[in-house]
Amino acid sequence: MSPSRRLTDAHPTLATVAQRAGVSRQTVSNALNNPELLRPDTLARVQAVIEELGYTPNRAARQLRTRSSHLIGLRFEPAQEGTSNAMMDRFVHTLVETTARTGHHILLFSGDPADPLDGYDELLRATAVDAFVITDTYAGTPQADLLRRVGAPFVTFGRPWDEPDAQHPWVDVDGACGARLATEHLLEAGHRRIAWIGWEEESRIGEDRRSGWESAMDAAGEDTGGLGIRITDNVDAARMAAHALLEDPAVTGFACASDTLGIGVLHALHERGLRPGADVGVVGFDDSMGAQVAWPGLTSVRQPLEQVAVEIVDLLHTVLSLKPVLEPARMLEPTLVVRRSTQRS
Amino acid sequence: MSPSRRLTDAHPTLATVAQRAGVSRQTVSNALNNPELLRPDTLARVQAVIEELGYTPNRAARQLRTRSSHLIGLRFEPAQEGTSNAMMDRFVHTLVETTARTGHHILLFSGDPADPLDGYDELLRATAVDAFVITDTYAGTPQADLLRRVGAPFVTFGRPWDEPDAQHPWVDVDGACGARLATEHLLEAGHRRIAWIGWEEESRIGEDRRSGWESAMDAAGEDTGGLGIRITDNVDAARMAAHALLEDPAVTGFACASDTLGIGVLHALHERGLRPGADVGVVGFDDSMGAQVAWPGLTSVRQPLEQVAVEIVDLLHTVLSLKPVLEPARMLEPTLVVRRSTQRS
DNA sequence: TTCCTGTCCTGGAACGATCCAAGGATAGGC
DNA sequence: GCCTATCCTTGGATCGTTCCAGGACAGGAA
């Protein structure tokens, strides 16, 4: 390929730039990766040519030499327990934006839903990604074990439930704190007998959230006997559970493990002619679209997903730079979004 | 690096496999890419070694040589007009799964929301992706123009509104058909004066859907005068619009451009003591979580997003294989999910 | 035997970047 | 005017794969 041909090529290479700028390839490479090594006038000349030709380093070549793809793997699952789809959307979007600031991109892959390990190994062996973000930790963290074993960097969204003292970096949202906020908010509104509608006992996330309700009730000196219900995450199941609980007229508050359950409670109130907010207070969890559009508006616990993504990327950078991770576990606190389902007036 | 060292290396290469199998590198490469060129016994021997070592070709090296990354770029936007977040989730998931079947992965990138072209060019110049999937075509398709100009393969989700005879491949869902289904469903339930609550006139998607309502009403010989409302996509705006329309007691049906708007109508009915389904029929659009959990259940038009993703990947493969695209434009039909908001009993 | 054909396999070169060790320019000191 | 020290710059080698041209070998026809 003749030099003149290359100059007009759609994809200029380092050599093209070097020739045009009258320097060697290495100098151009330094202009990109270690600009402080160049004399200012040389740097400026090289940068001008880079700009002029619209040169961008070939990722494959760079990846081959440096053994770093600048890609972060994320196994993209369908909606998961405790995470509505819209939640993942908020999270992933911030992840994409935050990683972009350092030239990283998110690579989505899929895997057999029955095998939480599927997909990871292949990408690693192909050196296709530098690190992973793991989001489905509610059923234990076999992925973390696998990745630690083969020495691949990763950060999880979700604490290691089974091994509280696991050393890998993780970020999570304090569900107990969220349920406590919800319960305290209902207590402040004057409710005393506040029920909990949550998930089955096997759900770690569900039990964590439930513990927040329990501790808030304990702190207020309220008895929780018979008030804690465990059902599947389903509007109708919650509606029926609420009907049963409302047979006791003293029950005037509901804290729920999800918006779906909270909406089920709203339906029951509606059927009984009770006014949400005025007569009975209801709080959901996740601040999903459902909570926003439900009549008359469902107060809900909102997870700081944007902040979770930022923290995860921060940890990823630390891990990738081989620096010691000083603070490998980060627990973030959710906030309460108040709507009319808890407002008396 | 000594041969024995390499054999125990975490990342075996083609050379490792070749040496171990007693063949040349090229033969191993053929075993992977053109197995029919090898004698069956040689092929079996090579495959056994590949299996034994857990060898996977290095993506960077392959990408450098073949100039194909097996990555599909997708600019990941926050929620867009006419597409709720949960919708994107369904779509992206199928996209990931379908592309995986041919060894492709999805690469997410972000861009300045104000500049629909941001991000594409850089990935192309870096030869980081083989093709793009474009999802935000509602405001024209400058991306398509850019990509066609530089000869990059792409498929759009969404027809080219501004140039109906554009030649690039696209897949879209027939919104007019969806609104027609909704309106006909209401007509069948005995409603005559059926209102349309849709978006502002600037929205191409909104106007397309509205045209379906108009044609169904025309076909039924019903006058649409004063029944077509254009507002922003917002529960309260829809609620107030519905109140105004319901001043005319003959209005007993609502077809809406989104679930958000449909839910607003449900709120208005609730405030007026009207029974959804029995007194007034309401249909939303998108079959979002809101439609599923709204009381008493909102009938909604559901887009075949899984099918859209499959068709897009099919078109991508055709384009990437440099074969002529026989059918570059594919319009899919939505379906109606019936819930209690349109059931009389 | 000789030549030819076709099948199967081989070794060198290339993709485009970075690493490395060594070469050259510049300036200052003698 | 020469030498040294300090930078900056240079060309060659390398990452792991695929492309290319050609070699080895067996079998059939002349």
Image: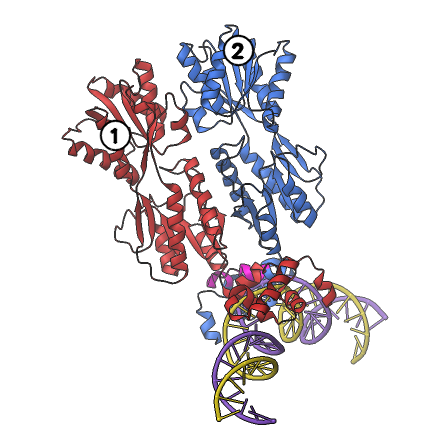
Chain colours: A red, B blue, C yellow, D purple
Residue B45 can be seen, yes or no: no
Q: Residues within 10 Å of mark 2 (few under 14, many from 20)?
A: some
Q: Quadrant of residue B186?
A: top right
Q: Which residue is at a point 61% across and 48% down the rendered structure image?
A: B131
Question: Which quadrant: the C terminus of chain A?
Answer: top left
Q: Which residue is at a point 35% across and 51% down the rendered structure image?
A: A142
Marks 2 and 1, how far apart at CA: 45 Å
Span highlighted in magenta in the image: B50-63
Question: Which quadrant: the N terminus of chain A?
Answer: bottom right
Q: Is residue A255 magenta?
A: no
Side of A252 where A315 appears, left or right: right
Residue placed under numbered mark 2 in the picture: B189
Side of B26 where A174 appears, left or right: left
Side of D28 where B319 appears, left or right: left
Residue B324: where, in percent of width, then height? 72, 44
Magenta stretch prevailing secondary structure: helix
Total residue callouts: 2
Residue B80: where, in percent of width, then height? 52, 34
Which residue is nearer to you in this view: A137 or A158?
A158
Residue type of the residue flagged with mark 2: Ala
Residue B242 can be seen, yes or no: yes
Q: Is residue B59 magenta?
A: yes
Which residue is nearer to you in this view: A90 or A29?
A29
Residue B271: where, in percent of width, then height? 40, 13
Residue placed under numbered mark 1 in the picture: A185
Q: Which residue is at a point 64% across and 62% down the rendered structure image?
A: A49
